[in-house]
Image (cartoon, rainbow, N blue to C red):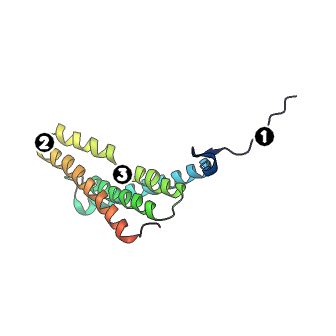
């Protein structure tokens, strides 16, 4: 019978001189996956709800719902990234918001399909306005999220 050697949980070592060396625990993968899934579910449900609600008052002649969701997701992502720089946020919570929620909430693939659909229908001006407006406004929304979080949270000391 072969007896395997039991090893302690993996610990990554920072490559520093030995007198400065410290141990960093390996990320808790099962917990991280739970947080990512929870964020993904929340983002999916938020995207579905807004995707159904926005056209009821904005109309369906232009993909306002996708544009609004992409801008909101860009803002949330910018806000979350800046907040994570200044607040003590665990990797699990950061992943839940950025990868889980924003990844499921924003709809870049839908945006791309709707742009191509507008172009295929001969709506060149609307398609170009939608594509360029989404990209430009998305960049501005990320900047606004970064600025809002920077104003709301003080840097760590």
Alpha carbon of mark 2 to alpha carbon of mark 1: how far? 64 Å
Residue 42, can we see it? yes
Q: Which residue is mark 2?
A: 124
- Does residue 35 appear left or right of residue 146 in this picture? right
Picture coordinates of residue 144, whole percent (x, y): 29, 62
Residue position marked by numbered label 3 in the rendering: 106
Identify the mark at residue 19; answer none if there is no mark: none
SS of the residue under disc 3: loop
- The answer to which image quadrant residue 110 occupies is top left
User: Mark 3 or mark 1: which is in front?
Assistant: 1
Q: Earlier in the sequence, mark 3 or mark 1?
A: 1
Could you tell me which quadrant the N terminus lies in? top right
Q: Is residue 37 left or right of residue 12?
A: left
- Secondary element at tag 1: loop
Residue linked to disc 1: 6
Identify the residue shown where x is 56% and y is 49%. Answer: 33
């Amino acid at each position: 019978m072969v007896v395997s050697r039991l090893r302690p949980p993996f610990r990554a070592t920072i490559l520093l001189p030995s007198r400065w060396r410290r141990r960093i625990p390996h990320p808790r993968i099962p917990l991280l996956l739970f947080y990512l899934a929870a964020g993904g579910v929340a983002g999916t449900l938020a995207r579905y709800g807004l995707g159904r609600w926005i056209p009821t008052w904005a109309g369906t002649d232009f993909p306002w719902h996708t544009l609004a969701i992409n801008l909101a997701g860009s803002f949330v992502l910018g806000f979350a990234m800046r907040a994570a720089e200044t607040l003590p946020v665990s990797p699990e919570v950061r992943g839940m918001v950025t990868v889980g929620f924003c990844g499921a909430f924003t709809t870049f693939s839908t945006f791309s399909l709707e742009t191509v659909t507008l172009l295929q229908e001969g709506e060149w001006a609307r398609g170009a306005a939608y594509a360029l407006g989404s990209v430009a406004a998305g960049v501005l929304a990320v900047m606004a999220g970064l600025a809002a979080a920077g104003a709301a949270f003080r840097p760590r000391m």
